[in-house]
Amino acid sequence: MVERKDTAHGRQNTTPWRVETHGINVVPDEDRHGGPSHVFWIWFAGNLNITAVVIGAVISSYGLSWFQSLIAMLGLLSFWLVGYFGIPGMRRGKPTMALSAHIFGSVGNKFPSLISWLNLVGWETIMLILGAFAFEGVLVHVLHGVSGPVDRLTSLAVVTVAAFSIAFLGHATIVRMQTIFSYLFGAMTVGIILLLLPHMDWGAIWRHRAGSWTLGVLPAFSIVVAASGLSWVNTASDYTRYLPRSTPGRKVVGATTWGAVIPLAGLTALGIVLASRVPQLATSVNPVAVLLSQLPGWAVIPYLLVSVGGIVASDILDVYSSGLSLLALGVRTPRSRTIFVDAIISIGLATFVLWHAEGFIALFEAVLSLLAGVLAPWAAIFLVETVRGERGMRSAVRLRWPALTAWGVGLLAALLTTSTSLVSGPLAIGVFNGSSLGYLLGFVVAWVIYAFWTRGVHAHGG
């Protein structure tokens, strides 16, 4: 009887279209399945996102040459960190923020878990807003009408149901759907890019003079790092914890890195070449509509469907991981029910922005930018213990002061040198003004303090 029950439990967590029952507990060996290709498709689909085009436009706004822009794009390789952070999840069978408790303590970990949850809920709301804009465009073109409240409400509902229902079902369903999204929307994205390229002024792009390496390339590089790899580090192990323990770590790192970098590189490069033709792309509240104006009429519907698909694929990961962060925060509820908490908050915020305050989205993004700066020093500490492997992340105590102190000092360094539309630190001048270098500084400061403080000492000794 016990064996049959365990077998049924395993199928529940490894079969698509069934609700996953695991939360932040250790995934047992009998439920482990899949390989690096699963991770590749998860991140490939999750980064087929229109926001990557905006990142490219931001790079171009620094007045860089094509060669310099490509150098700035190397920041996309920061996704290596996401891949590397997936290794402890595979080895120990826990999601990222649950592993964090072994470093910060069971009580101390509530602070980074809260930040992680807020950051993910914020981004899932942004994705709902962009997805609603895109699907609204589909309805308007199909029905040959004018945008109205019914279209907007319907669009928000469609995008919400698509993203939240898949996240509700859990890991196995996410793997299956992200693979489908990768093939379907990946091919369509290539088609849209090919449609846009002939309209570019290639001569102007090649002739563009080089900008400043210090005040142009370096800040642009830091923004790419912050907007790509650094923004996902708190979710890495969420998608590797089901892999068999024997899976080679280097293959997990490679699958994660290239799964994300391939679509990001194509879309970011598109944004760079489009920026000279569409200068408002870097600051637009609705980049979906801006790019729409560059396409022939017959391509409008395919483009909008690609936009919706990429946004939903990204939002699925936000919703799923935010639920795991909520559990790590100490909320006692089945993982699937955390989706409803997120839904209430995200739908409420998205509704407010869509109907009453579209200008509010700039303020919203500034808050999320600051939250990313808070996560950067946490990532540095997590990196130290990931390098240490099994010597770190031992049995949890309530508070680990070395980790909390290093995080606090790194956070202070990041905030003092960070400039956003919401708040600007007193040291956010020169190369730090208008860049994400403050986050990288916070990362380095936290890494140095924690690495030297705990040098030669196991994590449980803190």
Image (tube, rainbow, N blue to C red):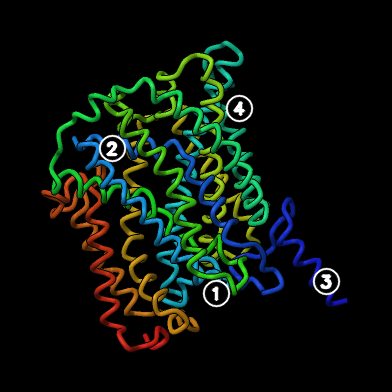
Dot 1 corresponds to which residue? Answer: 91
Q: Secondary structure at mark 2?
A: helix
Q: Position of residue 27 (x, y in %)?
A: 64, 71
295 lies above or below 458: above
Residue farthest toward the left in the current orientation of the protein? 430
* Three-letter amino acid code at the position of disc 2: Val
Q: CA distance from mark 3 to mark 2?
A: 54 Å
Per the image, the residue denoted by label 2 is 58
Contact (CB < 8 A) between labels 4 and 1?
Answer: no
Check disc 3 and report its element: helix, strand or loop.
helix
The quadrant where residue 371 appears: bottom left
Assess whether mark 2 and mark 1 are in contact (beta carbons under 8 angstroms): no
Is label 2 or label 4 in front?
A: 2
Which residue is farthest right?
Answer: 1
What residue sits right under mark 4 in the picture?
A: 154
Q: Earlier in the sequence, mark 4 or mark 3?
A: 3
Rounded to the nearest whole Å, what is the CA distance between mark 1 and mark 2? 38 Å
**Residue corresponding to mark 3:** 5
Work out whether mark 3 precedes mark 2 in sequence or the reverse, and give the earlier one: 3
For marks 1 and 2 on the same chain, the one whose residue lies earlier in the sequence: 2
- Label 3 or label 2, whichever lies nearer to me, is 2
* Residue beneath the point at 25% across and 35% down: 60
Image position, residue 327 (x, y; %)? 55, 64
